[in-house]
Image (spheres, helix red, strand yellow):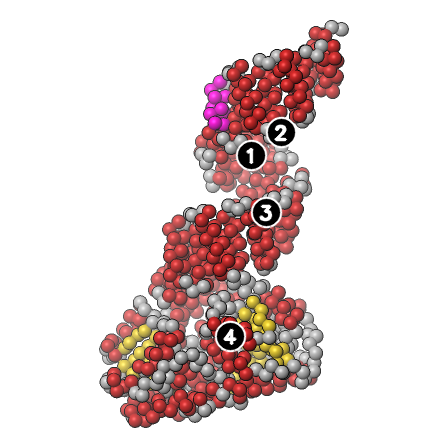
Amino acid sequence: MTIQQAFQIAVQHHQAGRLAEAEPLYRQILAVQPSHAEALRLLGVIARQVGRHDLAVEWTRRALVFNPNNPDSHCILGESFHATGRLDEAIAAYRRSLELEPSRPEIHTNLGAALAAQGRPGEAIASYRRALQLKPDIPEAHNNLANALAGQGQLEEAIAGYRRALSLRPNYPEAHNNLANALTGHGQLEEAVVQYRRALELKPNYLEAHNNLGVALNFLGRLDEAIAAFRRALEFNPGYADAHNNLGIALREQGQLDEAVAACRRAVALKSNFPDAYNNLGAALAGHGQLDEAIVAYRRAIQLKPGYSEAHNNLGVALREQGQLGEATASFRQAIQLKTDYPEALNNLGTALKGAGELDEAIHLYRRALELKPAYPGAHINLGGALRERGQLDEAVAVCRRALELQPDYADALNNLGIALKDQAELGEAIAVYRRALQVKPEDACAHSNLIYSLHFLPGYDARAISEEHQRWNLRFSDPLKPYLQPHANDRSPERRLRIGYVSPDFRDHPVGRFVLPLFERHDREHFEIFCYSGTIRSDWMTDRLRSLATAWRNTIGVPDARMAELIREDGVDVLVDLAMHTAGNRLPVFARQPAPVQVTWLAYPGSAGLSAIGYRITDARMDPPGSPIRGTDWAAEQPVRLPDCWCCYDPIGESPEINPLPALSAEGVTFGSLNNFAKVHDGVLALWARILNAVKGSRLLILCPDGRTRERVLAFFGARGIAAERLEPVGFLPRSEYLWLYQRIDIGLDPFPCNGMTTTCDALWTGAPVLTLPGDMPVSRAGLSILSTIGLAELAASSEEDYVRIAAELAANLPRLAHLRATLRPRMQASPLMDAPRFARNVEAAYRSIWQRWCANPSSGLKD
């Protein structure tokens, strides 16, 4: 057999796909004729076909030694270089092939692919276009050109290119998949799903198409189908990291957080340099409340991809939820620096700055986010919250309503709208809005607490109505936990040193912080240890002072309820005291888990938290008279523990203004005043105060009242009762130092009802303004009576509305008596139990000891089923 005959037989085997028979014949030819360039070239082709690209390069280079001007050899060499990522050499080989034969469309196509892989899209597009000029019916060239156009963001032209490729080759699964990708990017998700499914009909084991189908279905919110698609990809290749990552995203959005975390962990185990998977792992961990681990994952994503703006933003969110506002702010700023038109990061930075008290910059950032993304409900409600804190309630309400126009069933927007309406004393509407929020999101404990708290401000809601709402809260948030409650292993020695845990978001310069400070300073450290569980976001000097007085201080910002309950158990707390009740930032769901054997509520406002897991509430006999039917166990979940004196201890803390002997002398008329939260000032209160102004000629009213339409409404209300606007002086919210000085202009303070003042009453009395109060049945409406009785001024508590007006008019008419009363108020307070901190501390400690001993004798005492 001649060499030529052997070569012809080898080529026949090769063309028939019988590579194992062709290759030995080529080698035999070369053993006889080492310079046979075609045998060398075809051996290179076989090596490339079986994936042995280094060998393909070796054979092809030997072929080029004997025939340097063979364009096919240069093309094969380029394909082999391309397959091994040696792109510069591949491009050079393709270009040499085209120098020898410029009209080869497939080589132009290959050159375009190598240029695209090297990140040179413009040159790649030119190569693909040249291939199609030479031969318009190459489906691969149309597909690849469309890929390059899609990479340049030219999606409409790319979609047309994919469609042209499919018109030439309808059963082209890669083109179907690529067309679907472009349609997804163009927002045509339903058609994209159709194209992905067609690709999978043609190629059922097409991993990328299964994965991409899952992504499109996820975008459509069809999470079950998306998860099935990702799982199908993983059946074909369990080591497909992208599919594990995307599965984690879908599971997280479906609320299956444990599985989401596992999927993301698998993705990073398979592909350790996968920043997207670390970012998604962080999101899944954060959703699970594992913020420390989430922060580690986000930092790893950023380490792998420093310019990853989304990971910087997500890291900021996790840090903010932990109360690390400085670091969170830095992360958000970095995200914005990397991506200046990033509305979500601008919104989040605004929230961090709002938490730090920088309201003006926060408002600016929210507005900037809304310029970039006008239909952004989250930024609208955050802007509304900042405007509310700024006192711009009209705009706050309008902004929240705008969020609801964009997303009518947005529970957070409804909740924030309710808060703003409450601050305007639009209580009926606020309560209706809270109820709507709970219809949309029944599991929103925050909105439910806001509803309960607001009910205390309106006279139409009595003990029974509030108790019924408490029961609904228990049904939703407490009762489902009862089967999982565990017994307590605390040492039941009745006289041992006790661990007292205090839970509050307000360990700061806040009424709660000011009222607990005298107790903390006088606590008997020999017999009591103080554990503080602080949700305080904006720490200040008071936070530092209280922390210095605590045995242990736990930051609970961002700590999930279940983990916080575990922490309290681990600390061995004996008596756990809730200081927030249903006010903002409360942790009542933690108390529902009964982490301590004895649980108590106190201080946020007089009354009941209504939580069956809390056994006791600290009160006094004036707020909770024994034997009163509404204050029995049928009304309040907790058993009352009545202190011998007042339920609180007052310390003015800091510089106090001098007492003005009689403001009426310089004002040419008596000035009545109320600097209470305006939410307590409903129309019934305003009507009674109008009667006082009409009864006392020339008198004035200084009142804390929001600006805008609320103030206009109040002025109109008094005007309709014959009281000129110049007799009213509405003022806005002021810092404490300025607020205290306002009392120098008030002759007589007026307490609202049914929700009395507490801090404001004590401050008014301390600065020389006697306060008139109208007690009701509920403890919240008897705080004024408790305080006044404690300092020996129970005569300022009226028995009826008529009596309230009479006392005000008589006191205003007797200026010598009023002046004497003002001059003696401060020493009267100092000599009373209201300011006797050691006595108060002993009373509270005696209460703790008593209820602890009850538990030791009967571990089921103080708890209700």
Residue 443: x and y in percent read 54, 63
Q: Residue at x 60, y 39 (%)?
A: 210
> Measured along the vertical axis of the image, is residue 661 above or below residue 217?
below
Residue at image mark 1: 177
Ranked by sequence position, the earlier of labels 4 and 2 is 2
Residue 287: x and y in percent read 57, 57
Label 2 CA crowd tier, 10 Å (few <14, some 14–19, many 20+): few
Decide if residue 703 is on the left or right side of residue 166. left
Q: CA distance from mark 4 to mark 3?
A: 43 Å
Mark toward the viewer: 4 or 2: 4
Query: Which kind of residue does numbered mark 4 sit on?
Result: Arg
Query: Which kind of residue does numbered mark 3 sit on?
Result: Ala
Residue at image mark 2: 84
Residue at image mark 4: 545
> Measured along the vertical axis of the image, is residue 729 above or below residue 300?
below
Residue at image mark 3: 277
> Does the CB distance between marks 2 and 3 fall below 8 Å?
no
Q: Residue at x 68, y 11 (%)?
A: 35
Mark toward the viewer: 1 or 4: 4
For the record, the magenta segment spans 123-134
> Measured along the vertical axis of the image, is residue 212 above or below residue 412?
above
Query: Which kind of residue does numbered mark 2 sit on?
Result: Thr
Magenta: main secondary structure: helix
> Does the CB distance between marks 1 and 4 fall below 8 Å?
no
The quadrant of the picture occupied by the C terminus is bottom right
